Amino acid sequence: MNGRVSSLQSLGTLDGPGIRYVVFMQGCPLRCSCCHNPETHDLLGGTEYSPEQIVENVVKYREYFGQDGGITLSGGEPLLQTEFATQVFKLCKQKGINTCLDTSGCIFDDGVKELLKYTDYCMLDIKYATEELYQKYVGCSIKTPLKFLEYLNEQGIKTRIRQVTVPTINDSVKSIEDLALLLKGKNIEKVELLPFKKICQTKYDSMGLEFPFGNLPSADVKKVSELQVKVNERIEI
């Protein structure tokens, strides 16, 4: 069984705990208005790899991982290729390599539950805090990611919540309060607010696509930091 991969990063520091080998999977069912990786949308794009090929590459960098690092499956959306992802994580676990899943949580079925049996750490996007904003700027319901989060909580899987802070969309104190309410009492190690940037504009231009949030300014880093403090206070991290 092979999987389709958009790109590989050997020594990532932003995609989970420690230093990680990052596999950016090809294909995504969502069309988020703030997406920075439109090249990963098409499931038929990218390059084909076997699970064994991926793990062979990962093992080469084991000495850099230390106690916290390992492999991260990101995207695109890894949940579109759960059988492949599960096999990669199984092989990594056999070799004592920490596994991290970076996902939107937009799919939740038996295949996903099987994958989570071999997942040590999850970075889950809760893109917005309301159903209205999910429908408008993501194209799906918030219900599935919240169900996904509930299952992570039940299984005791360490979880980091990520949200891109977009000016005029979700950069208010009210939005942060709504997010904190969704997360209160869950098994969450960290909440990470990421300032919206427009460095992806060149990708959209080269692909002949319109960047949906191209008319918005980049986020104010100071304001995002202030909102980060508030969300941490509200869920007591």
Image (cartoon, rainbow, N blue to C red):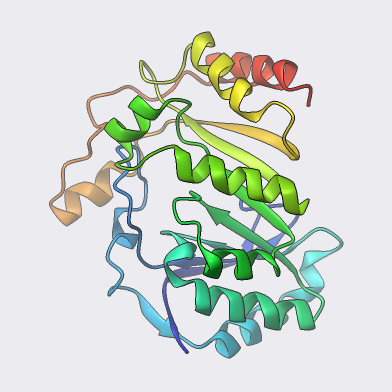
> Where residue 178 appears, x then y in whole percent?
54, 18
At x 55%, y 64%, the residue is 112
Q: Quadrant of residue 229?
A: top right
Q: Is residue 222 visible?
A: no
- Left or right, 11 with respect to 168, comes to right
Q: Quadrant of residue 45?
A: bottom left
| Residue at 38% over, 25% down | 218
Q: Which of the pair 37/180 is nearer the observer? A: 180
Q: Position of residue 53 (x, y in %)?
A: 56, 88
Question: 49 left or right of 206?
Answer: right
- Image quadrant holding the C terminus, namely top right
Residue found at the far top of this picture: 173
- Identify the residue shown where x is 48% and y is 64%: 78
Work out whether 69 lies above or below 93: above
**Corner quadrant of residue 236:** top right
Residue situated furthest right in the rendering = 67
The residue at the point 84 percent across, 64 percent down is: 66
Residue 145: image x %, image y %?
50, 44
Tell me where residue 98 appears, x and y as whole percent.
76, 67
Count how many numbered circles sit on residues in the image.
0
* Residue 85 or residue 76, whichever sits in front: 85
Query: Seen in the image, is 94 located left or right of residue 31?
Result: right
Evaluate whether residue 185 shows in this view.
yes
Eyeballing the image, is 156 above or below 129?
below
Task: Say which of 11 and 188 sits in front.
Answer: 188
Residue 89 vertical position relative to residue 199 in the rendered view, above or below: below
